[in-house]
Image: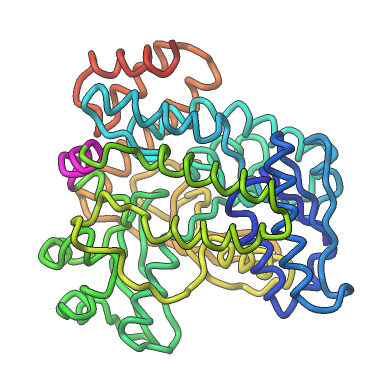
């Protein structure tokens, strides 16, 4: 099979390649096609991948790497397409963060006004990708990693339908970390409902028994979980569930803004400096690219969501449960083998979540087989959950329409409707700041 990776020069692409090399069924992918508009970054990542392949074993067992010169060439004949592009690069992310912060509202990549700005910039490119896949690889499955993942997946589904599946590792990783912290090794069934970066784990059954009440009552276990550090045990117990870590920005908005401003450097500014140093060093010394990349990855992970933790509390030591690359390989395996595996994905709602439109992309447990991902019925969320989901999902739909129309008034309405934007006047200034 042929796997095409769009955004092949991206910093996290080696995670996917390493997972493929570690996969006992790696023969499923015979060829990997890399495409990126930044040729210099792709040169560096190819050096990292070459070093990984060299240590992976006999050459016949390693998928061949091909470099495409154009989008159409990259997707032609693909069985799977990974879309992992960052339109505007990290400079665009920094702009998204700073425009919001300067107006006193949250500046974050996917949540709040920064996420809407990112979506407005990215949707036209995502639609071009979708049309290229429909023309040159109509039978391909698209796994979308591009943020804001739910919004971008929903936009692409207007062209490709259910053949686009959104990937995020946060819910699946939360479930596996809870299982590791509690020592459970049985069959896991997660009762999770939400949107991308906005969801709640309402129950976790291990061999049929819900262990979440015991987890919420155990300070030791909560202290070992990232969510316990971010939200605090008392708030988790008050909720009676465990939120996706990104709900910190909704539940503790003031604290998040204050922490980001106090740091003196946004996440985008940190990553621009760190990744810039990595790409420059690896370009100068290709033979050391793999070790340089691993060092940079370790530093990136240790500082993830630092604004959500007290300065005195480093990120907890986390079990190695894999990230979005593990979810992606799971989806590919389930589709290619017709396995009927279950995982939490961003998919078309149909009737899975009561109170949301059928065409809304939601993040729920889904069964994956040769016909794609099928959302499981999760029923009605709690009132406060559904209300927030409805509002944010409406904003995502409005943002998609604004990107399609190019109308500044459409964009203004989208920004003004977001729950993290508290003023129509501020929404208008956001539009000016982002769109000029």
- In magenta segment, residue 258: yes
Q: Residue furthest right?
A: 60
Q: Is residue 32 magenta?
A: no
Q: Nearer the viewer, residue 345 or 289?
A: 289
Res 316 → quadrant = bottom left
Nearer to us in this view, 271 or 390: 271
Q: Residue 138: x, y in percent? A: 79, 44
Please identify the dominant SS of the magenta region.
Answer: helix
* Residue 141 shows in this picture: no
* Quadrant location, the N terminus: bottom right
Per the rendered image, the range of residues in magenta is: 252-261
In the figure, residue 214 lies in which quadrant?
Answer: bottom left
Q: Is residue 130 left or right of residue 11?
A: right
In the image, residue 70 above or below residue 367? above
Give the left or right position of residue 36, taking residue 135 as reference: left
Residue 185 visible in the current orientation:
yes
Q: Residue at x 46, y 42 (%)?
A: 360
* Colour pattern of the rendering: rainbow
Given residues 10 and 408, the one toward you in this image is 10
Where residue 336 appears, x then y in whole percent?
Answer: 74, 67
Relative vertical location of residue 224 with respect to residue 155 in this rendering, above or below: below
Above or below, comparing residue 38 to residue 288 in the picture: above
Residue at left 74%, top 77%?
A: 25
Residue in the picture at 53% in, 15% down: 405
Residue 326, percent across and down? 57, 67
| Residue at position x 89%, y 74% in the image | 60
Q: Return the x and y of residue 116 as percentages of the image width and height.
A: 41, 30
């Amino acid at each position: 099979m042929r796997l095409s990776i769009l955004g092949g020069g991206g910093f996290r692409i080696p995670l996917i390649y390493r997972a493929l090399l570690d996969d006992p069924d790696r023969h499923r992918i015979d060829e990997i096609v890399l495409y990126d508009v930044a040729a210099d970054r792709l040169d560096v990542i190819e050096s990292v991948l070459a070093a990984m392949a060299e240590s992976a074993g006999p050459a016949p067992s390693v998928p061949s790497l091909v470099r495409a010169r154009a989008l159409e060439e990259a997707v032609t004949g693909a069985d799977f397409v990974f879309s992992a592009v960052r339109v505007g690069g990290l400079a665009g992310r920094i702009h998204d963060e700073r425009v919001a912060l300067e107006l006193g509202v949250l500046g974050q990549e996917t949540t709040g006004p920064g996420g809407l700005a990112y979506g407005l910039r990215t949707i036209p490119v995502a639609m071009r990708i979708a049309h290229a896949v429909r023309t040159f690889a109509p039978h391909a499955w698209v796994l979308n990693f591009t943020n804001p993942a739910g919004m971008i997946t929903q936009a692409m589904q207007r062209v490709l339908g259910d053949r686009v599946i959104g990937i995020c590792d946060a819910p699946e990783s939360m479930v596996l970390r809870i299982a590791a912290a509690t020592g459970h090794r049985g069959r896991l069934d997660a009762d999770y409902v939400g949107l991308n970066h906005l969801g709640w784990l309402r129950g976790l059954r291990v061999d049929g028994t819900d262990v979440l009440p015991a987890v919420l009552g155990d300070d030791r276990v909560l202290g070992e979980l990232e969510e316990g550090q971010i939200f605090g045990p008392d708030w988790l117990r008050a909720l009676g569930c465990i939120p996706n870590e990104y709900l910190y920005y909704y539940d503790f908005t003031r604290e998040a803004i204050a922490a980001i401003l106090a740091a003196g450097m946004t996440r985008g500014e940190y990553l621009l400096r760190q990744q810039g140093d990595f790409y420059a060093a690896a370009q100068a010394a290709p033979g050391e690219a793999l070790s340089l990349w691993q060092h940079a990855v370790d530093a990136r992970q240790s500082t993830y969501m630092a604004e959500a933790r007290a300065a005195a509390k480093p990120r907890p030591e986390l079990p190695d449960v894999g990230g979005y690359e593990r979810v992606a390989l799971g989806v590919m395996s389930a589709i290619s083998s017709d396995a009927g595996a279950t995982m939490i994905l961003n998919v078309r709602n149909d009737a899975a979540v009561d109170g949301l439109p059928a065409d809304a992309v939601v993040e729920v447990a889904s069964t994956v087989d040769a016909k794609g991902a099928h959302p499981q019925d999760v029923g009605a969320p709690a009132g406060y959950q559904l209300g927030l989901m409805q509002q944010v999902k409406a904003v995502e739909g409005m943002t998609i329409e604004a990107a399609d129309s190019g109308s500044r008034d459409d964009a203004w309405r989208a920004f003004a409707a977001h729950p993290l934007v508290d003023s129509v006047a501020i929404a208008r200034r956001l539009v000016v700041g982002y769109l000029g």
